[in-house]
Image: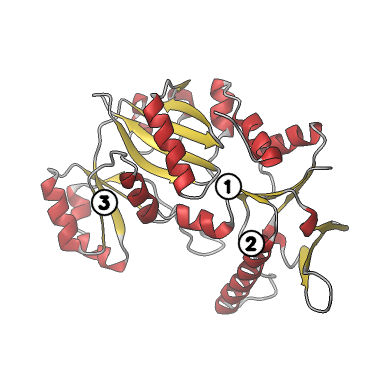
Amino acid sequence: MTTRILVLTAAGDITAERVAALLTGDGAQVLLFDPGTVPSGAQVELTAGGAGPVRRWLRTGGRDVDLDGLTCVWHRRPSAPVPPHTVTDPDVRAHLAAEVRTYLDGVWRGLDCRQVPATRDVIDRADRKSFHLAVAVGLGFEVPPTLITADPDRLLDFSAEHDGQIITKPLHRSPRGTEAAPLGRFTEPVGTRDLGHAATLRLAAMIVQAYVRKRVEVRVTVVGSAVFAVEIHSQATEHTRYDWRRYDHANTPLRVHPLPGDVAQRCRALVGRLGLSFGAVDLILTPEGRYVFLEINPNGQFDWLELATGLPITAAVARLLATGEVPA
């Protein structure tokens, strides 16, 4: 029986293309599809009623794909729906985008096939920092002293409790302003000048944490039962001291990390408890040798880690998609 895999991701996703090439080489049928092209460039249709079963079809590029015949759907990094440019009213555009997103989420959720790393609703829940932080604590991870608040006075008190050595980071991984001007921010230290603007915190809650000194940071990629750990030498350059996602590849060495067995098992347990089959866990290794949990990304990038270290993460992801199992 032919393995049929649908990869939901944005155009130009080289990581997904590499995984798809491995799967195709093993005889699987793989389609990379961007849901952001619905409905202007593609159609997803559902029929129900009468004596027959519910049927779902994807029509794209002159091709009809029977969604009910899929082996697996990989929710990789799909684009958000974009209404036609002929619709100019921002409120109408937002409504149309929400309608398409809601419809597609229902279609994917209803498919009777393997979904990696999980169904969209499970992925969205796992991605909530306030949720997965609590799960991590329950599993025994050490986490930095943390406050999530929209109260300026609590921020000031928290800063005083930690001698001003605090950082802030957004609650949402990729906050957006408009389609043309997306918003985003990195983990940042909080200085005296920042505290002078504490009143603006009332506009939205923010994560505040005590700053934890780092020997290195560790990205742990869990694929099924397999665990791949890479140490990121973020302290080698001032540019990445507070957030390695600022990227300074030339001055930030990446090396395979010998993760202790109990920490690896805790990472597996976290991914499983969140209902995922894949997850990228970010840890700090302190100068004293403690592992401190920061967050988990249900669809974190891994291609760059493999290219730097040779760890076979792509092959593990391909096996997960094809079989649903990757042994430790």
Q: How far apart are the two marked residues, 3 and 1, measured between alpha carbons? A: 29 Å
Q: Distance between the residues labelled 3 and 2?
A: 34 Å
Q: Which secondary structure lies at badge 2?
A: helix
Badge 3 element: strand
According to the image, label 1 marks what residue?
A: 117
- 10 Å crowding of disc 1: few (<14), some (14-19), many (20+): many
CB contact under 8 Å: marks 3 and 2: no
* Callout 1 secondary element: loop
Left or right: residue 162 versus residue 63 is left
For this orientation, the residue located farthest to the right is: 62
Amino acid type for the residue under numbered disc 1: Pro
- Sequence-wise, the earlier of marks 3 and 1 is 1
Give the quadrant of the C terminus. top right
Relative placement, left or right, of 90 versus 108 is left
Q: Residue at x 48, y 60 (%)?
A: 176
Q: Name the residue under label 2.
A: 109
Mark 2 or 1, nearer chain start: 2
Residue highlighted by disc 3: 208
Kindly tell me whether residue 246 is visible in this rendering.
Answer: no
The nearer-to-camera label among 3 and 1 is 1
